[in-house]
Amino acid sequence: DAMVIQNPRYQVTQFGKPVTLSCSQTLNHNVMYWYQQKSSQAPKLLFHYYDKDFNNEADTPDNFQSRRPNTSFCFLDIRSPGLGDAAMYLCATGKQGNQPQHFGDGTRLSIL
Amino acid sequence: GESVGLHLPTLSVQEGDNSIINCAYSNSASDYFIWYKQESGKGPQFIIDIRSNMDKRQGQRVTVLLNKTVKHLSLQIAATQPGDSAVYFCAETNTGFQKLVFGTGTRLLVSP
């Protein structure tokens, strides 16, 4: 029944070693979002795709990239993870108009 | 590792009490508001939403109140249960955009 699925749930990588997080959805929503959430903080939007159009937030570091090969899948690539990138990464989907975003259960990323 | 986050405001209630969680939103142009519940290790879960042409909306055990004059949103939970323990986030958006702006969050602790 899961509608927004994130894999893996836990990811450990080494400092500076590229890592990719994945998200898939069964809702056929045209908008997909990536958020970073640190302990006791609200989710912070990194970027979103409206269909194939990529929209980056002004303060998202260049280290973070995203790919959306089709409607169902979206990837978050961190090219050279630093210790400050350790966080929960949340994927969400949505539709245009007054509709709530639907979140996955996140990937918790640890940096060694 | 992760940077130390801010301490979340905490509301502690007894099981069976009614809970009220408050949120001040920032943008007078926002016209759609959502409450999310986030349990430990999970993504935000949609609870209830309200459009700006309404001032009250009720769900099962939950009520959202919107006061546009003072840009205030509240979530009322009736007969609070231990399973309601979580962090609650309000979020606002404008219909013309696909992006949510989250409030800082409130931790609800329900003791038996």
Image: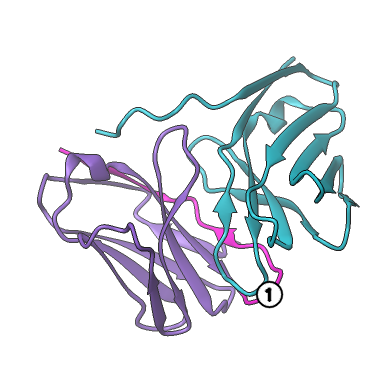
Image position, residue A35 (x, y; %): 43, 55
The chain containing the residue under callout 1 comes to A
Give the residue drawn at x 52%, y 35%.
B40
**In the displayed structure, does residue A76 sit left or right of residue A26?**
left
Residue A23 lies, with reference to residue B73, above or below; the image says below
Q: Would you name the residue on which mark 1 appears?
A: A97
Quadrant in the rendering for residue A29: bottom right
Instruction: Give the side of residue A78 with respect to residue A1, left or right.
Output: left
Residue B22 at x, y percent in the picture: 73, 34
Disc 1 residue type? Gly
Quadrant for the N terminus of chain A in the image: bottom right
Left or right, residue B81 beside residue B10: right
User: Does residue A8 appear left or right of residue B108 in this picture?
Assistant: left
Residue visible at 80% across and 27% down?
A: B19
Chain drawn in cyan: B
**Quadrant assignment, res A22:** bottom left
Task: Give the letter of the purple chain.
Answer: A
Q: Which residues are magenta?
A: A95-112
In this orientation, which residue lies closer to the viewer: A66 or B27?
Answer: B27
Give the residue at x 71% y 32%: B84
Tell me where residue A99 appears, x and y as whole percent.
Answer: 69, 68
> What kind of element bears circle 1?
loop
Q: Is residue B59 magenta?
A: no
The quadrant holding residue B11 is top right
